[in-house]
């Protein structure tokens, strides 16, 4: 069955960096585009970024553009989110989610999330 | 691009039907039939319930149904069950950055 497992979260200080990983299994990872979505404490979901199945295209929310970078290693079935210049408002649970072929607007499978806390 | 508007909470008794609205604009919900609905239980992976306004993925109960009229989409849960108690979010494609926007979320309580 499809499984997505996020890791790499933790407590960091403002201005520092962190890299999240999302290990995928149960499907052909290299044929699916992948998203990152976040949820701040007590708040709603916010789309963060998407990378195409072959990493040829990336798109970001304005709130993270220029600071975050989404990437993938299809040989390792792993999605990444490099987060730089972190701010307190980046504190959230970060989910990775799969996008079905030709339906990038659908998040059909999700991981359980990884908590990132940005605090001094 | 603002979040789509959902009621903060909706409640119902077991067996009843409830409807959650999701109001956007003519640039997102009204422009595309690309509305999806998700169920979130605390500590668990979110689950896709409905995509492209009305379609259910395999394995999703037919108690969940979706619709759309103009700039407002809706999720109806019929035959409400205790296990339906959760947070629900809609999402829509927007055609421009940010390309995907979520709703404000609705907490469903089964009385």
Image: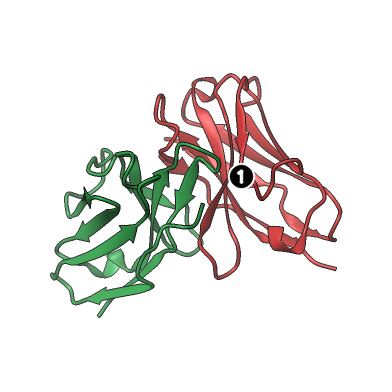
Please state the horizontal and vertical placement of residue A87, each as a whole percent of the image: 77, 59
Question: What colouring style does the render use?
Answer: by chain
Question: Can you tell which chain is drawn green?
Answer: B
**Image side of residue B45 versus residue A62, left or right:** left
Please state the horizontal and vertical placement of residue B38, each as a whole percent of the image: 37, 52
Outermost residue on the front side: it is B26
Query: Residue at position x 15%, y 61% from top?
Result: B78
Residue at the disc numbered 1: A61
Residue B111 figure quarter: bottom left
Query: Residue at position x 25%, y 56% from top?
Result: B74
Which quarter shows the C terminus of chain A?
bottom right
- Judging depth in this view, the residue of B55 and A95 nearest the camera is B55
Q: Residues within 10 Å of mark 1 (few under 14, many from 20)?
A: some
Q: In the picture shown, does residue B66 fall above or below A12?
A: above
Q: In the picture shown, does residue A90 fall above or below A60?
A: below
- Judging depth in this view, the residue of B110 and A23 nearest the camera is B110
Please state the horizontal and vertical placement of residue A22, each as a whole percent of the image: 62, 39
Please state the horizontal and vertical placement of residue B110, each as a whole percent of the image: 26, 75
Pointer 1 chain = A
Query: Residue at position x 29%, y 73% from top?
Result: B10
Which quarter shows the N terminus of chain A?
top left
Circle 1: element type = loop
**Image side of residue A82 versus residue A120, left or right:** left
Residue A15 figure quarter: bottom right
Instruction: Tell me the colour chain A is drawn in.
Output: red
């Amino acid at each position: 069955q499809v499984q997505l497992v996020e890791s790499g979260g933790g407590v960091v200080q403002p201005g520092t960096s962190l890299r999240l990983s999302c290990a995928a299994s149960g499907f052909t990872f290299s044929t699916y585009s992948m998203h990152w979505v976040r949820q701040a404490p007590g708040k709603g979901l916010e789309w963060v970024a998407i990378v195409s199945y072959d990493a040829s295209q990336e798109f970001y929310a304005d709130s993270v553009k220029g600071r975050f970078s989404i990437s993938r290693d299809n040989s390792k079935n792993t999605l990444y989110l490099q987060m730089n210049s972190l701010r307190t408002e980046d504190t959230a649970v970060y989910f990775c989610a799969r996008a079905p072929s030709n339906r990038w607007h659908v998040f059909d499978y999700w991981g359980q999330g990884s908590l990132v806390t940005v605090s001094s | 691009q603002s979040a789509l508007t959902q009621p903060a909470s909706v409640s119902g008794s077991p067996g009843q039907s409830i409807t959650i609205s999701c109001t956007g604009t003519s640039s997102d919900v009204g422009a595309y039939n690309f509305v999806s609905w998700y169920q979130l239980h605390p500590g668990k992976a979110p689950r896709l319930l409905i995509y492209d306004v009305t379609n259910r993925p395999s394995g999703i109960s037919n108690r969940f149904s979706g619709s759309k009229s103009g700039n407002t989409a809706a999720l109806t849960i019929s035959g409400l069950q205790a296990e339906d108690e959760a947070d629900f979010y809609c999402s829509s494609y927007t055609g421009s950055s940010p390309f995907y926007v979520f709703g404000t979320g609705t907490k469903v309580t089964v009385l």
